[in-house]
Image (cartoon, grey):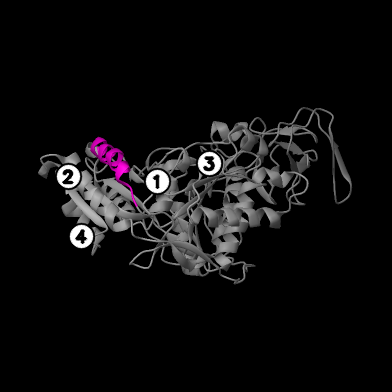
Amino acid sequence: MQQYIRINESDNVAVALTTLEKTFSLTLEPGDLTVQTLEEIPAGHKVALRDIREGEEIIKYGYRIGIATADIPAGSWVHTHNIRTGLGDLLEYKYEPVPSGVKRGITGNFKGFLRDDGNVGVRNEIWIIPTVGCVNNVASAIANISKKNLKGSVTDCIAFNHPYGCSQMGDDQDNTRTILCDLIKHPNAGGVLALSLGCENSNLDVLKPMLGDVDENRIKFLVCQDAEDEIAEGVKLVKQLIEYAGGDERQEVPVSKLVIGLKCGGSDGLSGITANPLVGRFSDRLVSKGGTTILTEVPEMFGAETILMNRCADEKLFDKTVCLINDFKNYYKANGQTIYENPSPGNKKGGISTLEDKSLGCTQKSGSAPVRGVLKYGERVSCSGLNLLSAPGNDLVAATALAASGAQIVLFTTGRGTPFASPVPTMKISTNSALAGHKKTWIDFNAGVLTEDGHTWEEVTDDLYDLVIDVAEGKQVKSEEAGFHDMAIFKTGVTL
């Protein structure tokens, strides 16, 4: 097994892939550089490959990840005690496009549910979408009773509860309405019950014009205040939805119909070495087949944003990406918060020292394809290829945002592990084999094998791609097996 890695030849740090004991010798090419550790280096953490002076840049991935706050002798542990962020607030950017190495490949097919609007679902479920948190328990009761009525190709009935839909103002309320409408029209749902209390701000009279024309066989509406027994009426309507959707069958559709969300959480020092670049390779492969991927968590682009900006297909997209970054920074500033508060305690424990360190690993999930679209929060994807989506780093909020924008599956890389789910199948990809072995009920795919002998990048990318197709064709991910289904809406404003 490989014990350490220098990611880029220009790096002045290496990353320990296993715990390196004190006096361990690292030998690196070119030049047969040999460095002996002066202290124990935990797995996922960094070790200085040469003497680094106070104020000098720390280089990893070939980019600056921070500034040394003290002299760091060669062989020393490099972490939060001797490195700080080098990032500023709002920056000036220049468009310097780089060519893409992603070429068009053979498309292929998979079996999905073709909807009347041309979109494709990878699940045929009944979704109950409350328009306001006041009816969450009603939605859950209807879903639980309706599970016994499942038939045909319908596999589940799910209530997606949330605390919003009323007592909100301005953009905050608009965001909630947009996400609710996105989920009501999501292709993974063969049938949807939109469940309203009746007096909330986001009531059905407001949402229906936003939804536009809908298939009344596929989407039903219920106002609880108008029904004598809202649970019984809801169960009746869901039964009609099951009858309608139960006859749907999977059929061969092009892989280009796949939309895959890209997200990471609980990152560690191996995230940018194993799981994230692996997902980047998957993204490039899907894009080469005409498919679509969506990268989000904008605050975890800070420090690596120019890499994405220079991959924009044209200057208009570059300008939209600049706004994507600066709008989020201004959101932090408007709320009196530090822009570069990241990384989290779990990230630091796993070996990530600064936001640049985290971001340079995070953005590798985007691969090398050109950016073809830049989406506002809640905006549905309309352009195939790689898209950037405005949403925060919070796992549940970002994964829900990906689903709302049209992702049928989310690939979620993690070095710490998490059991959470989202409205769509959320595949957990571990950065290290220890986590995959410890949390077999959480982890769907182990990218940690990339640090072990006998595993090539091409073979592991093939395995991940095949698993995604299996999931698209009905294989349950671990959170689905556990019965977990979550959603969270981005709260941005005042609560009345």
Say which residue label 1 marks.
Answer: 331
Q: Residues within 10 Å of mark 2 (few under 14, many from 20)?
A: some
Quadrant of the rendered image containing residue 152 = bottom left
149 falls in the magenta region: yes
Q: Do labels 2 and 1 touch, CB within 8 Å?
A: no
In the rendering, at what x and y percent does residue 52 appear?
A: 76, 39
Q: CA distance from mark 4 to mark 2?
A: 24 Å
The answer to whether 117 is drawn above or below residue 149 in the figure is below
> Which residue shows up at 53% across the image and 59% down it?
93
Closer-to-camera residue (382/50): 382
Q: Residues within 10 Å of mark 3 (few under 14, many from 20)?
A: many
Say which residue label 3 marks.
Answer: 265
Amino acid beneath label 4: Pro
Helix, strand or loop at disc 4?
helix
Closer to us: mark 1 or mark 3? 3
Closer to us: mark 1 or mark 4? 4
The answer to whether 4 is drawn above or below residue 183 in the figure is above
Q: Earlier in the sequence, mark 2 or mark 1?
A: 2
Closer to us: mark 2 or mark 1? 2
Q: Earlier in the sequence, mark 1 or mark 4?
A: 4
Q: CA distance from mark 1 to mark 3?
A: 21 Å
